[in-house]
Image (cartoon, helix red, strand yellow):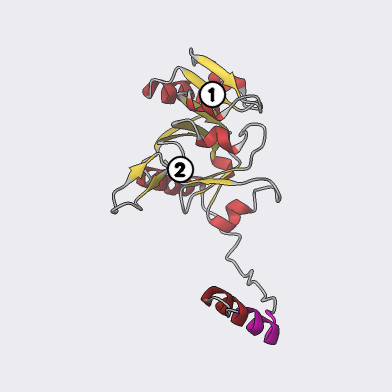
Amino acid sequence: MTGPTAREAVLGRIRDALELAPPRRQPVPRAYRTGRTLPDDERLALFTGRLADYRAGVRVCTAAATAEAVAGALDAHGARRVGVPPGLDRAWLERFGGEVLVDSQAVSPRMLDGLDAVVTASAAGCAETGTVLLDGSPGQGRRALSLVPDVHVLVVDLSTVAAGVPEALALLVPGRPTTLVSGPSATSDIELERVEGVHGPRTLEVVLRTDA
C-alpha cells in the first residue's frame, strides 16, 4: 500500500488549515473619491490628451456633424464593409457609402472578422484615464462586435465623459456587461515589444461630440 502523493499531502494540509481557521469574510473598503467634476474645456483637453497617448484617433465635432466625422474616420482606413449594432442611430451613417451589416446572433465570428470596421455608440467615458465604457445596450451591441473587427469607430458624447473612474462607473447600469476601452488593443508581453490588435481592434477612432 502506497502513501499519499506529494500533491495529495499538500492539499490535505491546506484542508486541515482551513478547518482549523475558517476564512472570514473581509469587509471591502468603499471610501472612493467621488463627486469630482471638471469644466467642459478641461475634461475635453484631458480626455483627448489621454486618447492621443493611447494612439487612438480623435475627431471632435458637433452633434450635427456626426455623420461627416464617422464617414471621415471610416474613409481614412479604407473601410467599405462596416458592422453596426441594431440600435445604432442610422443617421450617423448617412455620409458613408459602403455596405452596412446590422449585427445579430445569426452573424458568426467569421462574418465579423470579414468586416473592415465597426461603428458603435458608448455608455460613458473617463477623462482621467482616457477610457470609453460600453455596456452592451442596443446602440453598442454585443461584446464580439466591438472586439473582432480590426477598426472600431466609437461615438462618445462629452456630456457622458466623467472626470474620474468612480464617477464614470456611476453612470453605468448595474448588472449590464461592461467593456472598458483604453485605446487600441495592445500588449507588450512578448519581449516587451508592443503588438497591437491581439485582444481587440488594432485601430480605435473616437468621434467626440461636444454638444450632444
Mark 2 neighbour density, 10 Å: few (under 14) some (14–19) many (20 or more): few
Give the residue pinned by disc 2. 199
Asked whether, in this view, residue 159 is left or right of residue 20, the answer is left
Task: Check disc 2 and report its element: helix, strand or loop.
Answer: loop
For badge 1, the amino acid type reads: Met
Read off the residue under disc 1.
111
What's under tag 2, amino acid-wise? His
Quadrant, the N terminus:
bottom right
Q: Is residue 40 left or right of residue 28?
A: left
Mark count = 2
Residue 84 sits above or below residue 38 on the image: above
Residue 196 in the image: above or below residue 30: above
**Quarter occupied by the C terminus:** top right
Along the line of sight, the residue nearer the viewer: 46 or 101: 101
Quadrant in the picture for residue 134:
top right
Residues rendered magenta in the picture: 14-23
The stretch drawn in magenta includes residue 126:
no
Where, by quadrant of the figure, is residue 107 drawn?
A: top right
Mark 2 or 1, nearer chain start? 1
Across and down, in percent, residue 191 comes to 28, 53
Residue displayed at 29% across by 53% down:
192
Does residue 41 appear anywhere in the picture? yes
Look at 66% across and 76% down and name the residue there: 26
The residue at the far top in this view is 97
x 36%, y 53%: residue: 189
Name the secondary structure under disc 1.
helix
Please say whether residue 210 is visible from this viewpoint. no
